[in-house]
Structures are given as structure tokens and as C-alpha cells.
Image (tube, rainbow, N blue to C red):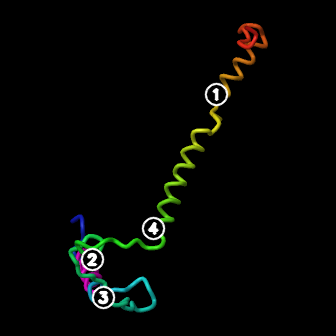
Amino acid sequence: MPAVRPNTAVRATRALQQHQSKSTTSARSFSATPRAPASHGPQYDPPTGWLFGVKPGEKYQKEGWETPFFYGFCGSLAVAAIAYGFKPDTSIQTWALEEARRRLEAEGILEDPEKK
């Protein structure tokens, strides 16, 4: 007896052919509404050849927000750097070292450095 019956093989082939013909003719989308074009005008800006749109020989005119933004940004970085420098040490290693020193001084194993 053969491993695959001829009748079963023919049915499987027909089913695959029908499935392929259905999938190529009717593609279903994931949305129930049809796709609308999203055209809000031309999306392409042709190149002008000038860096930041400033022609050679012209002086750049600052906008009103640029100066306060520059000083505010640099000033906040300076304040953050100073605050980070004065931040207290709250690491667990520092706490454990101080606690061990305190306990050793209380037991008399380690001398108190302030008594000298």
C-alpha cells in the first residue's frame, strides 16, 4: 500500500490551488474604512544651496527666542553642575564605613580620631 493515497494527494493539490487563487484576487485590509489619501500639499522643498537658508554675504538675523534659549540652557547646565558638585554622599558604602567606624570606636577597638 502506498504511503499517500492518490485521491488524497489530488484533493490536497486542488485545495492549495484554490487557496492561492483566492488570496491573490481578493486582498483584505485590516481596516473597515477605505484608505483616504493624505495630501496636504507638496512635501518636497527644493534645495536652495545655502546653509540654513542664509545667502552668502548676508548677516544672519537671530529670531526672538534664540538668545533666551541659549542663556537659559547654558545657565541651567551650570546650575546643575554646581548642584551636582555639592550633592551629599548617600551611598550605602559610605554609610557602612561610618557605621563600622562608630561601632569599633564604641567597643574600644579603634581610637577616636577627635580625642588626639
Corner quadrant of residue 19? bottom left
Snapshot quadrant of residue 26: bottom left
Is disc 2 placed on a helix, strand or loop?
helix
Q: CA distance from mark 3 to mark 1?
A: 62 Å
Residue at x 29%, y 75% (from the top left corner): 53
Residue 51's tag is none
Q: Which residue is mark 2?
A: 12
Q: Residue at x 57, y 42 (%)?
A: 84
The one nearer the camera, 48 or 112, is: 48
- The earlier-in-sequence mark between 2 and 4 is 2
Out of 72 and 40, give the one closest to the viewer: 72
Mark sitting earlier along the chain (1/4)? 4
State the separation of the CA atoms marked 2 and 3. Answer: 52 Å
Residue 102's x, y, as percent?
Answer: 74, 18
Q: Which contiguous range is marked in magenta?
A: 9-22
Q: For the residue marked with disc 1, what is the amino acid? A: Thr
Q: Earlier in the sequence, mark 1 or mark 2?
A: 2
Q: Nearer the viewer, mark 3 or mark 4?
A: 4
Any mark on residue 94, and which?
Answer: 1
According to the picture, the residue beneath numbered tag 3 turns out to be 42
Q: Which mark is residue 66?
A: 4
Q: CA distance from mark 2 to mark 4?
A: 71 Å
Query: Could you tell me how far apart the alpha carbons at marks 1 and 2 are, in whole angstroms?
Result: 74 Å
